[in-house]
Image (cartoon, rainbow, N blue to C red):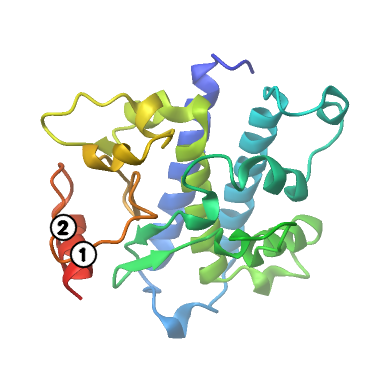
Amino acid sequence: MTPFDHSAARTAVESYLSCEQTLAGVLRVVPWCDEHKSVWSPALCTVIMEACTQLDSLWRFTAWHSTCVQQSKKRKDLSIHDYFRYFANQSLTPLADRWVVFWGGEPTQMRPFVRWGNAKTYTDLAWWLTYNKLKHDRLEHRKMATLEAAVEATAGLFLGILSCEYCRYAVEAAGWLSARDSVSHNPKASLGEDSPSVKDDYVLAETALFSYPVGWCKATISKTDDWLGNASFRFKHWFWEFATS
């Protein structure tokens, strides 16, 4: 796998879509609400394992090809503690600040990396701890595979793919991106979120279960704001209601 291996990036996207499809199947019979967050299922165990394994692989690959990682470290297994150091505050929009709208029931803002906000050292993510438990003994810890953990793990993978520089053309090829009609957006530039002005392009990354407004996670959405880019009706309606609430 090299930095220009686009088939590997497509594999990451396809892995996400597989997780999302399985999760959506569960949500058809167990809708998202506070009462159902602790519901567990073997299918959710599969979602958590696949989402976190893929995210681990994505981060490891990115770290191995980074000039910021020491060569001696590249020869060793990397851990979530390393990923925190390398990726938690990589861009102008840190992972802890990134939120998605989750469409599993009533639209919900989710921040799967929120515990990393302002942290100087690694802080545990509950859904990653669940993954580690399941990885070592799926049978003993199967009841930890809750709906909440599966949703957060899938959202974490979604954001991991969007923030990975090697996945940006695969994201566009998957049809996840929309923008203003007047904007010929470059996915590599916009998804990098390396300028505050990127939010003015109104780029939205959206799948069946999640929406991510590129560049808007640190912005204050006010009553004077309207989503001026192309997007699903559900997102435009949510954005308007969020701005006026």
In the rendered image, the quadrant that contains the C terminus is bottom left
Say which residue appears at 66% left-offset and 74% top-offset: 143
Say which residue appears at 76% left-offset and 44% top-offset: 82
Q: Residues within 10 Å of mark 1 (few under 14, many from 20)?
A: few
Can residue 202 be seen by looking at this rendering? no
Q: What amino acid is found at the position of numbered circle 2 in the picture? A: Asp
Say which residue appears at 53% left-offset and 47% top-offset: 157
In the rendered view, would you say 3 is above or below 175? above
In the rendered view, would you say 113 is above or below 15? below
Where is residue 165 drawn, in percent x and y? 50, 28
Residue 190 occupies which quadrant of the picture? top left
Most foreground residue, 191 or 36: 191
Question: Which residue is situated farthest in the bottom direction here?
Answer: 35
Q: Badges 1 and 2: C-beta atoms under 8 Å apart?
A: yes
Which residue in the structure is indicated by mark 2?
A: 225
In the rendered image, the quadrant that contains the N terminus is top right
Residue 195 occupies which quadrant of the picture? top left
Where is residue 225 drawn, in percent x and y? 16, 57
Q: What amino acid is found at the position of numbered circle 1 in the picture? A: Ser
Which residue in the structure is indicated by mark 1?
A: 222
Can residue 100 be seen by looking at this rendering? yes
Most foreground residue, 97 or 134: 97
Question: Which residue is situated farthest in the front direction here?
Answer: 196
Where is residue 156 drawn, in percent x and y? 53, 52
In the rendered view, would you say 240 is above or below 154? below
Classify mark 1: helix, strand or loop: loop
Count of marks, rendered view: 2
Most foreground residue, 87 or 60: 87
Q: CA distance from mark 1 to mark 2?
A: 5 Å
Q: Is residue 135 left or right of residue 148?
A: right
Say which residue appears at 64% left-offset and 29% top-offset: 62
Classify mark 2: helix, strand or loop: loop
